[in-house]
Amino acid sequence: MKKIYWLVLLLVSHLAVNAQDSLITDIGARKTTSLNGKWQYIVDPYETGFYDYRYKELNQKNGDAYWNTDIQKDRTEKKEHGYIDKYSIEVPGDWNHQKPEFTFYEGTIWYKKSFDYKPVQGNRYFVYFGAVNYRADVYLNGKKLGMHKGGFTPFNFEIPAGILKEKDNFLVVKVDNKRYADEVPTLNTDWWNYGGITRNVCVVELPQSFIQDFVLQLKRPVDGKAPAASPDASGWVKINNPRAGETITVEIPELKFRKQIPASGETTALNLKLPKLQLWSNATPKLYKVVVSTKTNRVEDKIGFRTIEAFGKQVLLNGKPVFMRGISVHGEIPQDVRRAYSQADAMQLLTQARNLGCNMVRLAHYPHDETMTRLADSLGVLVWSEIPVYWTINFGSTEVLNKAKAQLAEMIYRDHNRASIIIWSVGNETPISPTRTDFMHSLITEAKRLDNTRMVSAALEVNYASGKNLNLIDDPLGEFVDLVAFNEYLGWYGGLPEQCRKTNWGTPYNKPLFISETGAGAKGGFHADSLTRFSEEYQEWYYKEQVAMLKRMPDNYVGISPWVLNDFRSPKRNNPVYQEGWNRKGLYDDKGNKKKAFYILQAYYEQMKKLHDHPKSK
């Protein structure tokens, strides 16, 4: 019996890992119909619409199930649920900020969207979600399309033939944001668990055979060399339901490049020598329109071409050393106390980062909305993108590992053509143990299998060397990452900022060294002497001491992304005077005001920009 159980578990885990195989990318280049806007809802904390009174899942056609119509056939039919406009909510958007009664709500809410649609005979239709936190069960006209777990990555389900109607379609989504020990992330996080359909929703119309996904990137450099004048690019094209004798055409009109390649089944490898092109960089974020087509389908994307690698003690962008002037960013708009999802939201966050002097952002601790990475492409901002393997994940569970791998794949597939993304991160501050290291090593191996053109890293935790002047980053995971990154809060969680004056950092790994977090809390507008915690003056002092310490960093120090751009909501931060449910480590407060420490970091970044971007002026 136990053997059967494990076989079933492995099968389920396999399906979870391969759920992303159906993901359709480049949604903006497809024929879509938006389902954004007002959706009706039912709050269902006991999940009455999903389980019967014995707590067994309701039959698909059960009239009491909330995925079925709430319209009575006649006045005698019993209906104990209903969707009405009085209970409406905006999509995309988290539910927590939309109604006061939802501020602290974790549980199930049913969403319903009614719409008309004129399907074309012979075409295929999919419903696509940018993200739903956390579990989504999706039904159309009473038919279950599928279930997805993961609050920050996209997914889609095909609509079976005959289900979509011209009039009165009703799409129902059961959204459950409860936290569980065996999910990713797990029970304990330091950010708000915003629930809901938090990103765009649309119906995608496609032919029977279509281009599901493609990737085209410059090949990984060899021995730190810069790309050639006409560099080699590689990638692949994935065709859903390929036809015999199919031909794939790849075009880059601006370069007058066009090549036809015979398709080789579902996935066709690309190996192309591109004519002379302008490389993407911070200073020149050049994007080219790339068109991939077959006889029945065409998709395009704007792609920047560059190389990135950790080589010796440096990070090389297009063969040249780059110093990362970064900042960590949460996907949150603090002045509205909500999840970020729009182009305007991305512009606010990236503009704030650029005003600080950043050329890089760490998107923590989960994949952010696609508008962020696409805007970073056009602005020339380097990106660290991460999955929410955070703190005390169940590292001994194969099922949890496969859930993490599924989210990793969905993150990579969605964004593998984004030039701005230079680092895939597989986690943050995971406690050292052999089981954890095996778990994380497996994720690193998977990331490199899915994409070998970028660096892979993780934010490591520091064990301070008490009474000594040297802190070594010697986490065994350092053997497997490309970039040794670590979080340190010397002067906030460990003593006072003056401890930085004699502290030095190093690592036994001959790899680039990056500080992925550092910071101190301050309530915007609260002023006192520099010894007073939560004052702007204490945070300012902290950054002054940090900057002085950074000037003694070893020669493999390649950058820093302090914690954090803006104050953000966290249920773990409960000082009733200074926090009130906010993590106050932002350099901007929750109203968008700059704190005093902002100017300390800005001045340091200006110095580093002159030093690294204009080395002759040393």
Image: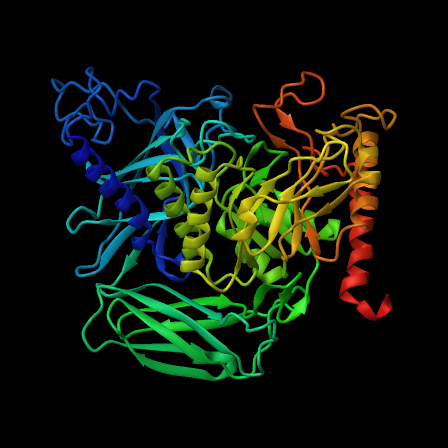
Q: How many marks?
A: 0
Q: Is residue 127 visible?
A: no
Counting from the top left corner in percent of width and height, residue 51 is at 23, 22
| Residue located at (66% from left, 52% from top) | 513
Q: Quadrant of the C terminus?
A: bottom right
**Left or right of residue 141: residue 599:** right
| Residue located at (67% from left, 23% from top) | 579
Q: Quadrant of the N terminus?
A: top left
Q: Is residue 489 visible?
A: yes
Counting from the top left corner in percent of width and height, residue 323 is at 70, 59
In the rendered image, the residue lying farthest to the right is 529
**Left or right of residue 530: residue 131:** left
Quarter of the view holding residue 242: bottom left
**Left or right of residue 74: residue 241:** right
**Left or right of residue 5: residue 522:** right
Q: Is residue 302 above or below residue 73?
A: below
